[in-house]
Amino acid sequence: MTEPIVNADPEAPYGRFKNGKPRKHPPKNTSSAPRRSRAKTKGPSYTEAVHGMFQMVALPLTFVNPADAWTINQHAGNIAVALNDLAQERPEVAAMLDRMLKAGPYGALVAACVPMICQLLTNHKLLPPGILGTVPKEQIEEQLRQEAAQMQQMFAEMVEQNTGE
């Protein structure tokens, strides 16, 4: 059992409640370990949708000011994660994001197509590389050459194994 605090307030030997009333009995939790907070129910993740929203803003900017579009793309991921974390803690932020992201079923489709469209535009030199994760066409071609060489090597090894038996 917890002993009263020495030199404590005589009216509140076990301390006071937050409202100022004296405790007449020791608190129920006498452990020195911190209390576990109730697990908050985690809401939906907004990260991908918020990131897609930034991509939608950056896309038209690529034609007007590629540097601004690049800047938005570079920082969109971190901002999306931070907004998601805030929405998990603050229901009013989650409600705001729900309203903003209510683009209907077509919004997700458009957001999913944006990176592909940007890469196609980059492949045809209508968009500079680096916007929304695009890479130069030559880099893709080199990767495809390497993959083809690996496949040829694997095929040759398989043929050699089968004919060598």
Image (tube, grey):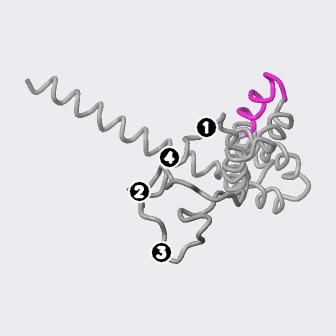
Residues at badges 3 and 1 in contact (C-beta under 8 Å)? no
Which disc, if any, is residue 12? Answer: none
Under mark 3, the amino acid is Val
The secondary element bearing badge 1 is classed as loop
Q: Which residue is mark 3?
A: 6
Residue 86, percent across and down?
71, 50
Residues at badges 2 and 3 in contact (C-beta under 8 Å)? no
Asked if residue 124 is positioned above or below residue 65 in the image, the reply reads above
Q: Quadrant of residue 117?
A: top right
Q: Quadrant of residue 107?
A: top right
Residue ID at (86%, 37%) = 100
First in sequence: mark 3 vs mark 1: 3
Q: Residues within 10 Å of mark 2 (few under 14, many from 20)?
A: few
First in sequence: mark 1 vs mark 4: 1
Residues at badges 1 and 2 in contact (C-beta under 8 Å)? no
Give the quadrant of the N terminus: bottom left
The span shown in magenta is: 103-114
Q: CA distance from mark 1 to mark 4?
A: 40 Å
**In terms of depth relative to the viewer, which is nearer, 142 or 26?**
26
The secondary element bearing badge 2 is classed as loop
Q: Which residue is mark 2?
A: 31
Does the magenta segment cover residue 148? no
Q: Quadrant of residue 158?
A: top left
Under mark 1, the amino acid is Lys
Q: CA distance from mark 1 to mark 2?
A: 28 Å
**In terms of depth relative to the viewer, which is nearer, 76 or 133?**
76
Residue ID at (49%, 52%) = 35
Q: Which residue is mark 1?
A: 42
Residue found farthest to the front? 10
Which disc, if any, is residue 143? Answer: 4
Under mark 2, the amino acid is Ser
Q: Residues within 10 Å of mark 3 (few under 14, many from 20)?
A: few
